[in-house]
Amino acid sequence: VQLQASGGGLVQAGGSLRLSCAASGRTFSRGGMAWFRQAPGKAREFVAAKRSASGTYYADSVKGRFTISRDNARNTMYLQMDSLKPEDTAVYYCAARVNDPILTTVRLERTYDYWGQGTLVTVSS
């Protein structure tokens, strides 16, 4: 099983990027998928998650600016990031689990069994 994150890069503050996470080896159409990020010198933190059932979840810091989506036919997840800020600079990781997580655990790293390698997003001021 492999999760391949892509789409990172350098962007100016106020700009946009779209990250992709392509899964191979098994399907996650009935499971949960999420994005986390780790800024330099900081712990990894939750960004957004989407269950196969209804429900999307966002960190307060990105709510209203980021949108998570999934294309189950392509076994791919996306993160549309708009109005980017310098504090969004981080390595972004995608994560997945085969079954939907219970609501109280969607923001926890330990909920997810599979992780991508990360893609670097740098936002300049």
Image (spheres, rainbow, N blue to C red):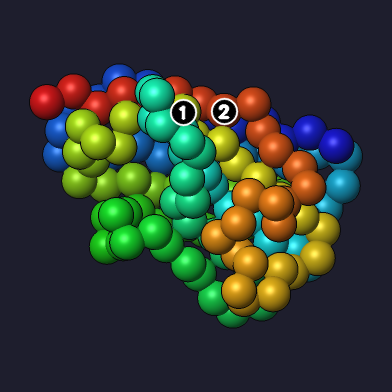
Q: Read off the residue under disc 1.
A: 91
Q: Quadrant of the C terminus?
A: top left
Local secondary structure at mark 1? strand
Which disc is residue 118 wearing?
Answer: 2
Residue type at the position of mark 1: Val
Q: Is residue 34 left or right of residue 62?
A: right
Q: Earlier in the sequence, mark 2 or mark 1?
A: 1
Q: Nearer the viewer, residue 69 or 107?
A: 107
Please, which residue is most extreme toward the left here? 125
Q: Quadrant of the N terminus?
A: top right
Local secondary structure at mark 2? loop
Query: CB under 8 Å between callouts 2 and 1?
Result: yes
Q: Residue at x 45, y 51 (%)?
A: 47
Query: Where residue 39 sits: x, y (%)?
Result: 39, 30
Quadrant in which residue 72 is drawn: bottom right
Residue type at the position of mark 2: Gly
Which disc is residue 109 wearing?
Answer: none
Q: Is residue 52 above or below residue 118?
A: below
- Dot 1 surroundings within 10 Å: few (below 14), some, or many (20 or more)? some
Q: Is residue 40 above or below residue 72?
A: above
Quadrant in which residue 42 is drawn: top left
Q: Residue at x 48, y 67 (%)?
A: 57
Q: Is residue 55 left or right of residue 23?
A: left
